[in-house]
Image (cartoon, grey):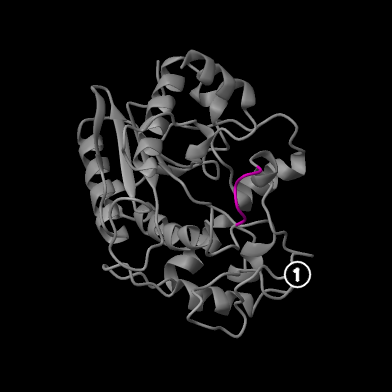
Amino acid sequence: MPLFDRYIAVDWSAANSPRRGKDSIWIGECGPDGRVPSQNPPTRHAAMEAIVGRLLSARQRGERVMLGFDFVFGYPRGAAIAIAGQPDWRALWRYLAANVADTPDNGSNRFQLAEAINQRLPDGPHFWGHPHQHSYATLHPKRPTAAYANIPERRVAERYVRSAQPVWKLTGVGSVGSQAMLGIARLATLRGDPRFADDIAVWPFETGFADDLGKPIVITEIYPSLFPVGDADGLPRDRAQVEVTTTRFAELDRAGLLAAFLGPPAGLTAEEHTILIAEEGWIAGAGHEALLAQLRDAA
């Protein structure tokens, strides 16, 4: 029996103004009756309203939902205690939810907040990258060379997915730092929404990877590039990726492989396993090359 009835994938954006089309937010969905038309909301505020609406509708139908976002859910080991005072992902989420300003028209304080966090990190500035027309005292346009001695540049997950960028990179090709900062703050609010009461679990933190996937809504960190996208027929690549991702999740689930896909990879040490669940998080499917190859061959 499949773990979920519905699969939603979100390609997130840290854009500073409303945006549609290329490099904007896309929401893909696959349900019991097949694909649902993808949405391209112009702002993060509108995107979260759309997602909440979809989740509420699914719960009214008694459906279980796997909801994926393509940004980092946790920072490298040691970051949470330095930033939020506790070595725990919840503390980091609370800190970002309390300190991120993200207006309904996509205005945000992400660079100012990154500068403020840089000032409190023991190794010196970790975040880097900002618009060329601005300057910041402790946020520089290029990667700092004297950093990352105590708080690493990359999570364990990036050892398995080499193309994934570090969370400290805020701008430029492949950057995910801004998306993660703004996205985590939004997910912290979603997780605390009383309309969902005790319905939500954040993977892998609250599920022990695949040990407990029993909550009706499981929110996962995804990396759509794990699933190759062929000819998109003129569609924006971001849209094609979320549509392929939801299709692949549904296929894995029907084949009885999704729990393995959401499990930890072989080769983790006991210490790493503990750190990933307490603080760093993981990318769904990372380290499961055999399952990914099986999907590619089936396609």
Magenta span includes 163: yes
State the residue position of label 1. 145
Who's the residue at 64% across and 70% down the image? 142
Who's the residue at 75% across and 32% down the image? 267
Q: Is residue 216 visible?
A: no
At label 1, which amino acid type do we have?
A: Thr
**Magenta span: chief secondary structure:** loop
Q: Is residue 269 visible?
A: yes
Q: Position of residue 189 (x, y in %)?
A: 36, 59
Who's the residue at 70% across and 71% down the image? 144
* Quadrant in the picture for residue 65: top left
Q: Position of residue 30 (x, y in %)?
A: 30, 29
Q: Is residue 217 above or below residue 181?
A: above
Of 163 and 276, nearer the camera is: 163
Q: Position of residue 289 (x, y in %)?
A: 63, 26
Where does the magenta region start and end? 162-166
Give neighbour class at mark 1: few <14, some 14-19, many 20+ (Cα, 10 Å): few
Q: Position of residue 263 (x, y in %)?
A: 59, 30
Of 130 and 3, nearer the camera is: 130
